Image (cartoon, rainbow, N blue to C red):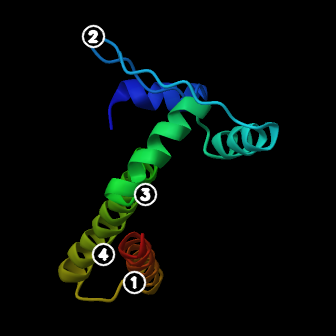
């Protein structure tokens, strides 16, 4: 995920980033008022422009997921990675203190509970990704 697309996403433009040479392909699509309303609602819910929504949903048939869904999955995995790193650091600190003193640390139970919660979140994320 590029910084450029992250900025666009944060600004809420819902537009795709520019590419060298532009996008010369153009399609004029006529819709009924009901279809237009549905497209507007779906695009807004996905935080995208209608053209971007049409492109992503149309191309998703081929890959089984949209670019936005893939990006959201990657963001979720990076979040879990950071959380796991933080918990691992705590486990290492507890192990170091336990080895130095020979006594069980007070934070051990809370940290191990956090490890279990992170593992459950990772399992849930993997299950969610495997179903999509």
Residue 125 position, x and y percent, is 42, 71
Residues under numbered marks 1 and 4 in contact, where contact means CB atoms less than 8 Å apart: no
- For marks 4 and 3, give the one nearer the viewer: 3
Q: Is residue 27 above or below residue 125?
A: above
Pointer 2 residue: 21
Residue 17 position by quadrant: top left
> Circle 4 — which element?
helix
Residues under numbered marks 2 and 3 in contact, where contact means CB atoms less than 8 Å apart: no
Residue 129 position by quadrant: bottom left
Please give the label number shown on residue 76. 3
- In the picture, measured across the screen, residue 121 lies left or right of residue 42, that is left
Disc 2 to disc 3, C-alpha distance: 32 Å
Disc 1 to disc 3, C-alpha distance: 22 Å
Indicate which disc, 4 or 3, sits on the residue closer to the N terminus. Answer: 3
> Circle 2 — which element?
loop
The answer, for residue 49, to whether it is visible in the render is no
Residue at the image point whose x is 36% and y is 28% from the top: 3
The answer, for residue 39, to whether it is visible in the render is yes
- For marks 1 and 3, give the one nearer the viewer: 3
């Amino acid at each position: 995920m590029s910084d450029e697309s992250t900025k666009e996403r944060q600004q809420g433009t819902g537009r795709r980033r520019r590419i060298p040479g532009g996008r010369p392909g153009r399609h004029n699509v006529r819709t009924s008022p009901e279809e237009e309303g549905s497209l507007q609602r779906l695009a807004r819910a996905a935080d995208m422009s209608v053209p971007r929504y049409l492109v992503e949903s149309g191309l998703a048939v081929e890959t089984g997921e949209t670019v936005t869904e893939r990006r959201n999955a990657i963001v979720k995995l990076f979040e879990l990675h950071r959380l796991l790193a933080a918990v691992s650091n705590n486990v290492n600190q507890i192990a170091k203190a336990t080895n130095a003193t020979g006594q069980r640390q007070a934070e051990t139970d809370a940290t191990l509970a956090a490890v279990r919660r992170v593992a459950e979140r990772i399992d849930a994320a993997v299950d969610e990704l495997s179903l999509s």
